[in-house]
Image (spheres, rainbow, N blue to C red):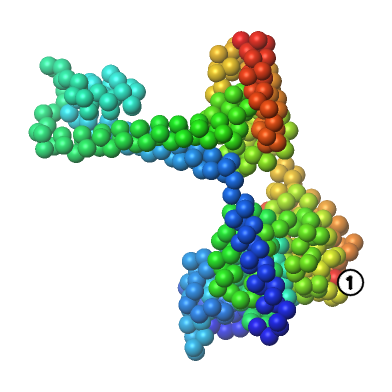
Amino acid sequence: MADKKFIDFYKKNLEETKRKIKASVTDDLLIVQIINNIDDLNKIINILAKDLREWYSYYNPEFSKEIQDHARFVELILSGKDKKIKQSMGAELSKEDLKPIFNLAKKIKDVFEFRDEQEICLEKMMKKVMPNATAVAGSVIGARLLQHAGSLKRLIMLPSSTVQLLGAEKALFRHIKSGSKCPKYGVLHEHPLIMKANRKDHGKIARALADKISIAARVDYFKGKFIGDELIKGLEERFG
Amino acid sequence: MIKKSKIFEVYETQLGRRNILLTKNLVKGVSVYGERLFNQDGEEYREWVSNKSKLAAAILKGCPNTGIRKDDVVLYLGAASGTTASHVSDIVGENGFVFALDFAPRVVRDLVFVCEKRKNMAPLLEDANNPESYKDKISKEVDIVYQDVAQKNQAQIFLKNCDMFLKKEGYALLALKARSVDVSAKPSVIFKKVREEISKKLIIIDERKLEPFEMDHCMFVCKKK
């Protein structure tokens, strides 16, 4: 490089940028990574469990049909409680043929356990980083909101009407573009208050819940007092 | 057979039926984003993938002049991982300089790795919306301003930066993404609005729609009065 000025710019900017990137890593980003990981683990579990059922059904189709829940299915196979009925249409497989099936079941069980561990980690981190929002929304929904907003700072800067619709972007933009029905909620859908309520109250509760989550997240961001239990209590009195 | 194209320091060659663009590789043997490298007469060339770079798309669509020349100082707003920025750094060569600016830490992390290999490129983690914050970190006047940010107020950011840093009669390039200005409005309406807004302060030389490479994008090449 001919110009000495540029060498200075190069060195200073490179150093400063590195420093800034180092400082940009915060706890809320780690939470987003954990929830992403949990989502992926769920996907993996589904794929593998489907494989297992397909494979196992050659041996004992009735049992696979009877137990729909993946976790229980794997558990029962491994503990040897998968008795064949007498008129089973499954083929007789030798021990050698069954071995890879059981190995797969073992691995799926490991993934189930690993996912539960990650969920415990998530809950711990959520309680540390966002105690109020966790009290109101629960750790998984709180983390999902963070995931959609990108970071805690961006989440608290969103209006609560946007928080209400986080995760329903597709439906929302369909509504804006072509005038179909407006969605009432996004990731908040899984919240117990909404799940329990009448269908007609869903929108109302989602709006009130988003309000309280917004307040709680803002308190968390500025490291305020713990008011989460008051907020959720108010909601439960109103709708519970 | 690699030969010069109409644009300064940009080369082209025929590959099968397709015409591809190339730039001379500043750092021998290094491919930045997985693009192919070509050798001819002891020189190494990097393929400029038009699906990944809006500037390459604009050139392929027939943009007659981008204004970027050898030894220029470029302010690049919205550099992301340095895909297009690395080609701009190829074009300006060793004596030029590129200030590559982006706002998101995640992509600047990749940009730093590119900049560490290229001595004529400096990364900046700053918000283009706020030129005051980085005015001491770049040179007072630049020859070129290139902007590719997906923000709602793209045009205002562009004018602000041109106002502060661009030299007289310097070129300014704006890759406009209509969908980030307004998702529901028609792109052509937005292009018209932006054209009016920019032409108050700059002379628009060329305007290219980037279909089929990028949907609803438009490249404006302007010159400061």
Q: Residue at coordinates 50% horizontally, 32% vertically from top-left?
A: A124
Q: Is residue A235 visible?
A: no
For image coordinates 49% across by 40% down, the residue present is A34
> From what the image shows, is residue B111 above or below residue B95?
above
Residue type, mark 1 in image? Lys
Residue at the spot of label 1: B225
Residue placed most toward the observer, B220 or A70: A70
Residue occupying the point 78% across, 67% down: B136
Above or below for A71 versus B10 = above
Quick check: A143 above or below B1?
above
Q: Relative to residue B70, is residue A55 drawn left or right?
A: left
Image quarter for residue B71? bottom right
Q: Report the residue at 45% width, 31% height from top.
A: A120
Residue B122, image x, y percentages: 65, 69
Chain ID, mark 1:
B
Helix, strand or loop under label 1: loop
Q: Is residue B168 left or right of residue A78?
A: right
Badge 1 crowding class, 10 Å Cα cut-off, few under 14, some 14 to 19, many 20 or more, is: few
Residue A228 visible in the current orientation: yes
Q: Camera-side residue: A79 or B50?
A: A79
Quarter that holds the C terminus of chain B:
bottom right
Res A64 quadrant in image: top left
Which of the 4 quarters of the picture holds residue B220? bottom right
Return the residue nearer the eye: A52 or B66.
A52
x and y percentages locating residue A171 in the rendered image:
62, 32
How far from the left and from the top, in percent, is residue A202? 63, 17
The foreground one among A210 and A199 is A210
Question: Residue A177: x percent and y percent?
Answer: 69, 37
